[in-house]
Amino acid sequence: MFAEKSVKTFRELLGTELPIIQAPMAGVQTSALAIAVSNAGGLGSLPCAMLSAEKTRAELTAITGATRQPYNVNFFCHTPPKPDPARETAWRALLAPYYKEFGIDASAIAAGPGRAPFSAEAAEVIEEFRPRVVSFHFGLPAADLLGRVKATGAVVVASATTVEEALWLEARGVDAVIAQGAEAGGHRGMFLTEDVTTQAGTFALVPQIARAVKLPVIAAGGIADAAAVKAALTLGACAAQIGTAYLLCPEATTSAVHRAALRSADARRTAMTRVFSGRPARGIVNRLMRELGPMNEIPPAFPLAAAALAPLRAKAESRGDGGFSTLWCGENATGCAEIPAGDMTRRLAGC
């Protein structure tokens, strides 16, 4: 039996017409995708991990100027690592043959994190715009910052990849938990462990979390059509969060090489990897993953690994080569379609 609970419906929780949340996908979207999904009756999401406070404010201005519907603003909550010169040197030495192949001067590559955790500046933006939903990945921000978010009246949602993480989030006052199954594309939300053997599939994880917590549960990972959404709801979820299906929509900023990979048979083979960012994430298997091994331990800690790869990615993509690109993709790309995001949202909801 499920734990006794009074779970809010998705309408009460999200304020939306449909039980569909567009997953926030840093690097492949702007406000345009969020606007289209929200206007279609789902919950559009804006990923802010790679945005400054000024850019976040500009994107939220665009959203509030184009829709009166609820939307979600998403942030990372990782602890920035201390730079490790020895590890960075080892990482660049491993990449040296590729730098030579593409004629890149490794000494000219600047280090940089590329992704920032939720901050006081970000909290100020949330206080200004007061979005319906604020979601977090990799745990939660410090208690004082979380308190500022909750004081705005926002529904606070966070990702859990295990029952233990869901219980941890519940104990700290979130309003709902995203059960992120191992099938999900992009970065794993894991934060209490780095052991990938703990990562269960969506349709195993959702009912376990639903039994363990007295909170609404949102299913994420491998959900590509209305039948899968219905299955997730049957297993105890109140809504489904979906990302991969939106990657070919015209409102997404998915790169040409990423789109080509999604249209190809390559999309049927994904793997969890840490070579691109230093943290486990799921993407389409490409050259870098094959040649270095997807879970190679040499890359620096998240998010420091990405800087050394940036010029390789740029050079390769200029030749139409996605061998060094972050081709994030869930295990089920069959729902991808080159249709407007609003139509995709209604399709996923079975409308």
Image (tube, rainbow, N blue to C red):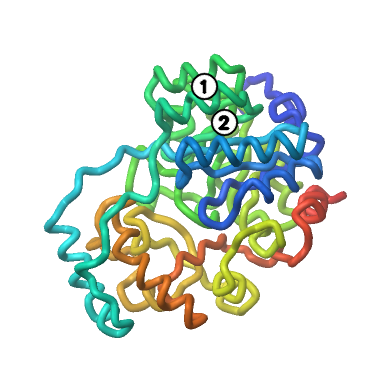
Q: Quadrant of the N terminus?
A: top right
**Left or right: where 289 falls relative to 229:** left
Viewer-proximal residue among 54 and 291: 54
Check the image and name the residue furthest to the top.
151
The residue lying at 64 percent from left, 20 percent from top is 5
The residue lying at 56 percent from left, 51 percent from top is 25
Q: Secondary structure at mark 1?
A: helix
**Left or right: where 58 falls relative to 298:** right
Q: Secondary structure at mark 2?
A: strand
Mark seen at residue 149: 1
Task: Provide the residue designation for mark 2.
Answer: 134
Viewer-proximal residue among 17 and 46: 46
Viewer-proximal residue among 11 and 235: 11
Query: Residue 190: x percent and y percent?
Result: 41, 43
The relative height of residue 138 versus residue 265 in the rendered view (above or below) is above
Residue 251 appears in the picture as rendered: yes
The residue lying at 40 percent from left, 76 percent from top is 315
Query: Residue 108: x percent and y percent?
Result: 24, 67
Find the distance from the CA under tag 1 to the CA under tag 2: 8 Å
Query: Residue 219: x percent and y percent?
Result: 62, 43
**Left or right: where 114 falls relative to 12:** left
The residue lying at 62 percent from left, 24 percent from top is 130
**Left or right: where 195 falls relative to 314:** left
Check the image and name the residue furthest to the right.
351
Pointer 1: residues within 10 angstroms few (<14), some, or many (20+)? many
Query: Residue 115: x percent and y percent?
Result: 39, 47
Whether label 1 touches label 2, CB < 8 Å: yes
The kind of residue on which mark 1 rests is Val
Query: Looking at the image, is mark 1 or mark 2 earlier in the sequence?
Result: 2
The kind of residue on which mark 2 rests is Val
Viewer-proximal residue among 225 and 150: 150
